[in-house]
Amino acid sequence: MSTLLLLKKCVLHQPFDLKCLPPSFFSKYYLRGRKTIHGEVTVYAHELLRKSEKIEGELKNQQYVLAWCTELILSYFLIVDDIEDGASSRNGQPCWHLLADVGSLAGNDASMLRSFIMQLLHINFSSQLFVDFAKLFNEVFFICNVGQHLDATTSKNRNYDNFTMENYKNIAPDLRKNDFTDYYDDDEQTGKTGSDIQAGKCTWLAVSALQRCSPAQREEFVAHYGSWQPDHVARIRDIYQQLGIVDIYFREEQATYDRIIKKIESLPANAVPSADFFKTVVDAYYPNVTCGKSLTLSKRPPQKQKKVLSQDAYSSFINSLPVIIDKGV
């Protein structure tokens, strides 16, 4: 018997119940209480591409499976990111690796969740579609893992001469919003307790501050950044405030939003996806711009993301999760 056939036989005749494995639990754990913008956009895009066609039955199931797989990708990276950052909370609850019955198993659980995503795709799509999606998902995993590696090594080296906008964009292009919400350190708004300052991360805020620091401010930044002492963190926040980093952030967000909208408006009338699709997605991802124009920059807090789907469509999407997860195991 070939090795491949032997492995296939072992998988098809497991001596254990797959439901005993944790993906069903921890995939839901990291989805609970979290915004599902990625999945919503996936459903919304499919609805628009199908236009007037009624989506039901197996096609509707596949739509939801693909949407939840995009959300599970984020769950995978949240587990890994929380481990590397030494984070304490996510979505108002302890991080997965801090649970008493998890601990050092969290890394393997993350790997299992990644495999579980592929399992969901494999059992719900044809061979060719599975191959296409697997290639796409693996590309996402690879790019994000490279960014995670650069993020960790840059923070570990603590050479602030390397905190340049060029290096930042190599680590995490267009993640200014994520860095800003971490700075707000509001678990209700961001879903986690911010720790970028303490961990010495190469963030948009740190790079922007170093670009504008006076020699004295730079000396103070180098002395206090990357420390977990509350008074050191407070000093970095003071520097950000002195330099007006919050106002700079909102101005750049507005400029980015305007630039994207200009490109969308230049699309032809028969574009696929349509200009309306892109506008809906952009407005969902830029609530600070679209919801906060009446407030002054300094007083404008992070806004909650808009839902892309109607309330009925959103409820149907959310309620599909238990069935899809259980089918995968």
Image (cartoon, rainbow, N blue to C red):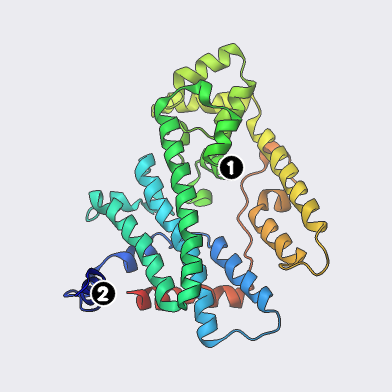
Q: Is residue 293 above or below residue 70?
A: above
Tell me the element at label 2. helix
Residue to which mark 1 is pinned: 173
* Residue 102 x, y percent position in the rendering: 25, 54
Q: Is residue 20 visible?
A: yes
- Which image quarter is the N terminus in? bottom left
76 sits left or right of 248 in the view: left
* Residue 282 x, y percent position in the rendering: 69, 56
Q: Is residue 327 above or below residue 183?
A: below
Tell which circle, 2 or 1, labels the residue nearer the N-terminal end.
2
Give the CA separation, mark 2 to mark 1: 41 Å
Q: Quadrant of residue 37?
A: bottom right
Residue to which mark 2 is pinned: 8
- Which image quarter is the C terminus in? bottom left
The residue at the far front in this view is: 2
* Residue 327 x, y percent position in the rendering: 37, 78
Tell me the element at label 1. loop
The amino acid marked with disc number 2 is Lys
